[in-house]
Amino acid sequence: MAKRSYNKTPIREQDAEVRSHNFKEVVLGYTMEEGNLEANRCLQCKDAPCIQHCPVMIDIPGFIKQIKEGDMDGARKVIARYSNLPAICGRVCPQEKQCEMVCRLGQSKKFEPVAIGKLERLVADWSLDHPEEPADIAHDKGKVAVVGSGPSGLTVAGDLANAGYDVTVFEALSKAGGVLSYGIPEFRLPKTIVQKEIDQISAQGVKIETDAIVGKTITMDEIMSDFDACYIGVGAGTPNFMKIPGTELNGVYASSEYLTRINLMHSYEFPKYDTPIEPAKDVVVIGGGNVAMDCARSARRLGAEKVTVAYRRSVEELPARVEEYHHSVEEGIDYSWLTSPIEYIGDENGQLSGVKCIKMQLGEPDDSGRRRPEPIPGSEFIIPATTAIEAIGQGANHVLLDTFPELATNKWGYIDADEETCATSIPGVFAGGDIVTGAATVILAMGAGKIAAKEIDQYITEKKANTVNN
Ligand code: FAD
Ligand code: SF4
């Protein structure tokens, strides 16, 4: 066998200068040869810590072994036992904080971990190019409603359809996918890939009703009388605001509006699509998570010459994925560390012209364990900008909750659901994903979906058995 290389097999990417002017995918993926080379780096550990650190516990050495042996169909079958959305996860999961973080190969100082995510993506893309006939399953075990078609809802729906249930997903927007469709931009997660994985779930017999707002166009009472059980995965997409003076000025956006206009309404293809975004030369993005990176990189692609991310802590605390941060730097995004906006400045036409900021210093750790940023008096300065995008976190989606007050929520307004079972305060109603945990990750939302599918199966089976016995 060839000597194991120290570094991950490099992945091809679009050139940074070229890609900062288009919305095409940045990372181009492995060829079969590159994938095989990378698969050969895996040690095939017997105790595989990578599996334990995957929220859906994919048999990672199992599918990597199949790649090594050139059996892509076998690799696809291993992954399919654990995930309905591998092409999505292979692209957006924070592997560096999960499976790859504990990869035994990477524990040695000389070696980088196996590129598990890139290998998952290779198998998943191969699978989408070689679709299988869906299994012929009777959906006669019961009826389940799923509210919300994000990764959590899609996972429950796919698993329950495979287990023999008649599943209907109700989605408020015109397109299924949740954040995968309206939040994460095309250059990180092409919408054709999202759609193909959703199509595979539909092919398993899942019905998806879009433009169906539970709490408005259909009520929870109707759902509870028509279905044997219900899963709520409505996500956390309500934006938090800085609440500083000048928020009403033209050019100040919430990240969710900015990204939805771009992703769902294709504003980057204006006038082919009729939702424009005002072009801006100077843009300030406030925040430091994945959402902030996505906004900054989208603004650059829309033609901004200078995009500055204002983050109130330092690069060490940046919550965004390392890969996204590096990509953003390559694309010419500037960072103003230890910076917090305090006011939006406008011109005589009500248009934003600058963001007044104050410098911060890091004090003692706060509840999150990170050092608390504190303003430095007298350090105010202005960053010129005609667009500012606030990406400082999201809260619970409320439409359903407001019309269903019987459902217990916690002090942050998220649904109070059992971590181990996804059961809520109401029998037959389960919940998971961001609406329970607060804004988190795709794979954690999917993990909750997997747990809920098992619990819903058990709940309906027992309910039917009790009905027969009585
Ligand atoms: P969502 O994906 O939010 O889906 C909820 C769905 O429910 C939505 O489609 C919504 O329209 C629908 N809905 C809401 N109310 C109703 C109602 N009353 N009736 C019917 N439908 C309703 N995570 C990662 O792992 N990696 C990343 O790189 C990453 N990047 C991100 C970038 C952005 C811009 C954002 C916003 C998030 C990102 N995340 C990332 C987080 C991740 O996308 C979420 O944690 C995940 O999508 C949560 O899934 P969910 O199914 O719980 O909810
Ligand atoms: Fe392979 Fe790393 Fe998992 Fe070991 S920990 S099986 S080397 S991917």
Image (tube, rainbow, N blue to C red):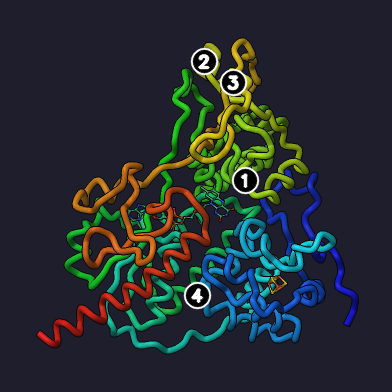
Nearer to us in this view, 378 or 399: 378
Residue type (three-letter) at the residue carrying disc 3: Val
Name which quarter of the figure residue 365 lies in. top right
Give the number of the mark in front: 1 or 4: 1
Location of mark 4 (residue): 200
Give the number of the mark in front: 3 or 4: 3
Q: Above or below — where is 109 with respect to 278? A: below
- SS category of the residue bearing label 3: strand
In 3D space, how far apart are the residues under numbered discs 1 and 3 (Cα atoms)?
22 Å
Question: Number of marks in the image?
Answer: 4
Location of mark 2 (residue): 349
Give the number of the mark in front: 1 or 3: 1
Q: Residue at coordinates 9% horizontally, 84% vertically from top-left?
A: 470
| Mark toward the start of the polypeptide (3 vs 2) | 2
Q: Evaluate if marks 3 and 2 touch, with contact meaning CB atoms under 8 Å apart.
A: no
| Mark toward the start of the polypeptide (1 vs 3) | 1
Where does the image place residue 411, in percent across and percent down from the top left?
Answer: 32, 42
Q: Is residue 401 left or right of residue 85?
A: left
Q: Residue at coordinates 19% horizontally, 52% vertically from top-left?
A: 406
Location of mark 1 (residue): 320
In 3D space, how far apart are the residues under numbered discs 1 and 4 (Cα atoms)?
30 Å
Q: Evaluate if marks 3 and 4 touch, with contact meaning CB atoms under 8 Å apart.
A: no
| Mark toward the start of the polypeptide (3 vs 4) | 4
- Mark 2: few/some/many CA within 10 Å (<14, 14-19, 20+): few
Residue type (three-letter) at the residue carrying disc 4: Gln
Q: Above or below — where is 284 with respect to 274? A: above
In 3D space, how far apart are the residues under numbered discs 1 and 2 (Cα atoms)?
35 Å
